[in-house]
Amino acid sequence: MLFFRKRAEMPAPAQILPGRPTPLPTAERHFINGRPLKGSYPEGVETVVLGLGCFWGAERKFWQLGDGIHVTAVGYAAGTTPNPTYEEVCSGMTGHNEVVLVAYDPAVLPFETVLKTFWESHDPTQGMRQGNDVGTQYRSGLYLPDGDPRRAQAEASRDAYAGALKAQGYGPITTEIRDAGPFYFAEEYHQQYLAKNPGGYCGLGGTGVSCPVGLGVAAE
């Protein structure tokens, strides 16, 4: 099918789908903790957008961190098409990545723990894929606005993990670290999917290589 073919390169500008002006309907509240999915979030809560393969399993990695996580949500970012659908993103014609929005309290959960969880939960050396999942929407990405002071931490963590991976025979990290632009919440059925469907498939997997302990407290 057109929408589900495996596309491992970004679309040309003339191929970008037009999208739509209005957001897609999505869940109002987090399925696990009942908090408003779109906020507003309490004072002090920070957000980061992360792409690490199939967003069902990726989101679970972060809500499982427990204390310090305010909400998690899945969506689409780092692309061009406004308000894309899941099928459009999977077509490779929107430029978007499947991503997780992580809203966390840094007073309880250090950003270093979020970074460690990100790096260890996928293989960031695979380009436009994760395992058998191939496509532009499965690329590794860490998205923070330009000028965000956490950007330096993110880049330092990338460099540290690159060294650990190289020592184990892996190639260079392909993760993009940049401003994602707008975050579009995915359709309601995708939100906290593996909490609603515990037996659901998601091929997300890490390398087994530990991110250097110096980054902070290890995530479980």
Image (spheres, rainbow, N blue to C red):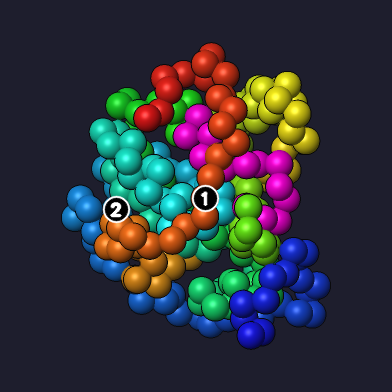
Work out whether residue 183 can be spotted: no
Q: Is residue 127 magenta?
A: yes
Which structural element holds mark 1? loop
Q: Which residues are magenta?
A: 115-130
When asked about the image quadrant of residue 65, the answer is top left
Q: Is residue 66 visible?
A: yes
Residue under label 1: 204
Which residue does the image show at 62% across and 42% down from the upper left?
123
Amino acid type assigned to the residue bearing label 2 in the image:
Ser
Judged from the image, the secondary structure of the residue bearing numbered disc 2 is loop
Q: Quadrant of the C terminus?
A: top left
Question: In terms of depth relative to the viewer, which is nearer, 115 or 150?
Answer: 115
Rendered location of residue 74, percent (x, y): 43, 59
Foreground: 12 or 204? 204
Q: Amino acid at mark 1?
A: Leu
User: Which of the image's four quarters has the N terminus?
Assistant: bottom right
